[in-house]
């Protein structure tokens, strides 16, 4: 069985992420979407919320699983018995960053392959930062992400807490 991980912060998950995960799922027996717990950037959502949004967005893909992680990505890949790490590419600057990360990770874990998938044309402009900025300025994000994520984003930006979208805390452990 070939297992790949698709790591990221997914703050929040959007149609570009969903497209990459779905396409990876057609290439590998199992894809584990790894929601990184400790990125070096400020986040709009907690790890638990990001995991819940990813699970909701990817529920129709039987061979895609969503798990949080807090270790090095290559260590998470090893723990999951993954043979590949999948990343998405939109623009030239993505390539430069992903190339540097791939070489670093290949040095740390030579047994793991790195696969970059080009974004689909309709998602080439899309990033979590753009989605959040459009939403913060009152723009329509319905073409950018799922209805559940739209609701979570709008409520967070408006400072509202709706029990229907509240996510219970979960334990994040290393096996």
Image: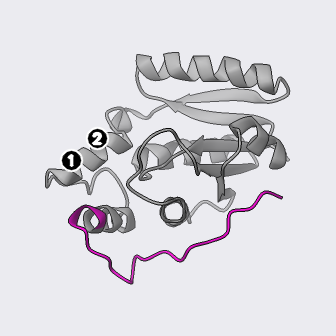
- Element type at marker 1? helix
Residue drawn at (57%, 47%) of the image: 38
Left or right of 44 on screen, residue 133: left
Front-most of residues 127 and 37:
37
For marks 2 and 1, give the CA distance: 6 Å
Left or right of 108 on screen, residue 7: left
The label number, if any, that marks residue 43 in the structure image: none
**Pointer 2 residue:** 130
Image x and y of residue 16, in percent:
43, 43
How busy is the neighbourhood of tag 2: few (under 14 within 10 Å), some, or many (20 plus)?
A: few
Front-most of residues 24 and 45:
45
Left or right of 59 on screen, residue 154: left
Residue drawn at (48%, 60%) of the image: 46
- Location of residue 15 with respect to 171 vertically, above or below: above
Left or right of 115 on screen, residue 141: left
Image x and y of residue 116, in percent:
59, 28
- Residues in magenta? 156-175
Image x and y of residue 132, in percent:
29, 49
Residue 128 appears in which quarter of the rendering?
top left
- Element type at marker 2? helix
How busy is the neighbourhood of tag 1: few (under 14 within 10 Å), some, or many (20 plus)?
A: some
- Location of residue 79 with respect to 67 vertically, above or below: above
Residue drawn at (72%, 42%) of the image: 4
Residue 84 appears in which quarter of the rendering?
top right
Residue drawn at (58%, 33%) of the image: 87
Q: Main secondary structure of the magenta part?
A: loop
Image x and y of residue 136, in percent:
20, 52
Count of marks placed on residues: 2
**Pointer 1 residue:** 134
Q: Is residue 72 magenta?
A: no
> Where, quadrant-wise, is the C terminus in this rendering?
bottom right
Please say if the residues under marks 2 and 1 sit with CB atoms less than 8 Å apart: yes
């Amino acid at each position: 069985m070939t297992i790949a991980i698709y790591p990221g912060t997914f703050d929040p998950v959007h149609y570009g992420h969903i497209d990459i995960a779905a396409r990876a799922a057609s290439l590998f027996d199992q894809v584990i979407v790894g929601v990184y717990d400790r990125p070096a950037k400020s986040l709009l959502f907690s790890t638990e919320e990001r995991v819940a949004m990813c699970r909701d967005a990817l529920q129709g893909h039987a061979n895609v699983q969503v798990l949080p992680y807090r270790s090095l990505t290559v260590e998470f890949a090893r723990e999951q018995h993954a043979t590949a790490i999948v990343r998405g590419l939109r623009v030239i600057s993505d390539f430069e960053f992903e190339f540097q990360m791939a070489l670093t990770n290949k040095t740390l874990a030579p047994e793991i392959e790195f696969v970059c998938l080009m974004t689909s044309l309709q998602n080439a402009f899309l990033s979590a930062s753009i989605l959040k900025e459009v939403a913060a300025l009152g723009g329509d994000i319905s073409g950018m992400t799922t209805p559940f994520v739209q609701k979570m984003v709008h409520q967070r930006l408006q400072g509202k807490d709706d029990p229907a979208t509240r996510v219970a805390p979960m334990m994040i452990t290393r096996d």
